[in-house]
Image (spheres, rainbow, N blue to C red):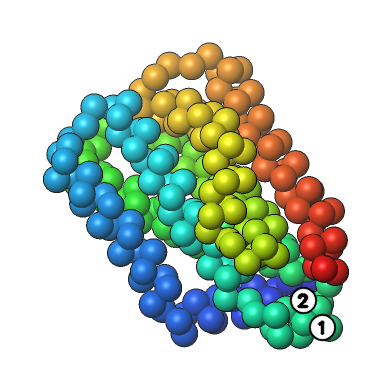
Amino acid sequence: MYKHIVTLLKKDLLLELRQQYTFYGVLLYVASTIFVLYLSLEQPETNVWNGLFWMIQLFICVNAVAKSFLQETKGRMLYFYSIAGPVQFIIAKLLYNMIIMLLMSGISLLLFQLLLGNPLIHFWQFAGIVCLGSISLSIVFTMLAAIAAKAQQQASLMAIMGFPIIIPQLLLLMRISKAGLGEVFKESALSDMVWLLTGLNGLVMIMAVILFPFLWKD
């Protein structure tokens, strides 16, 4: 099982390295969006900075995750069906999208600090929350992309299904990330919200592992 997961993950990473235009396309989207925000707002206030950052992460995730299933043709999916199981396949996709989102989130955080100012008081705390948030967004949209791929309307269906689901999670991320901006939380309250977000991630991963085999057979 682990060998199949590693092999599928290597396959996705090698394809990403060979087809670099897709990666650079998302990177250009990130840089151009943040640059437009810089031209419009220059250095926004702290709450606006925080809100814009997470909204950008949301749209980055939609663009980055959608292509992971879009590039899989029916013939290729049939081949994967013959050599690996659905659980291995979806876990490999989840890990791949986590890596992509972590990389994109790190780049966007750097660009935000360079162009839109640096309101962060506790940088490493905020960076840890960004990592957790990137994983959360990638898990949710990977599952949605797998469902939408069957309908042949990935972009529109992902948006329709994804935004109502992701809004509570996004609001929770915005709230937690204020700890890195200097807002004081009760220690128990902050840890409870972090554990709640971690629990949601685990729940969505379990749902993906349970439900994806039914999509796989179809």
State the residue in front, 172 or 55: 55
Residue 156 screen position, x and y as percent: 53, 55
The answer to whether mark 2 and mark 1 are in CB contact below 8 A is yes
Residue drawn at 36 percent across, 40 percent down: 53
| Amino acid type of the residue tagged 2 in the rendering | His
Query: Where in the figure is residue 32, as x and y percent of width and height?
Result: 25, 57
- The reply to whether residue 47 is in sight is yes
Task: Reply above or below: 161 against 147.
Answer: above
Neighbour tally class for label 2: few under 14, some 14-19, many 20 plus, Cα within 10 Å: some
Q: Which image quadrant: the C terminus?
A: bottom right
Read off the residue under disc 2: 4
Q: Taking 50 as reference, is 132 left or right? A: right
- Give residue 105's position: percent from left, percent from top: 42, 52
In the structure shown, which secondary structural element does the residue marked by tag 1 occupy? helix
* Element under disc 2: helix
Which disc, if any, is residue 135? none
Q: What residue type is labelled 1?
A: Ile
Residue designated by label 1: 83
Q: In which quarter of the image is residue 75?
A: bottom right
Q: In this view, does 63 lie above or below 68?
A: above
Q: Distance between the residues labelled 2 and 1?
A: 8 Å
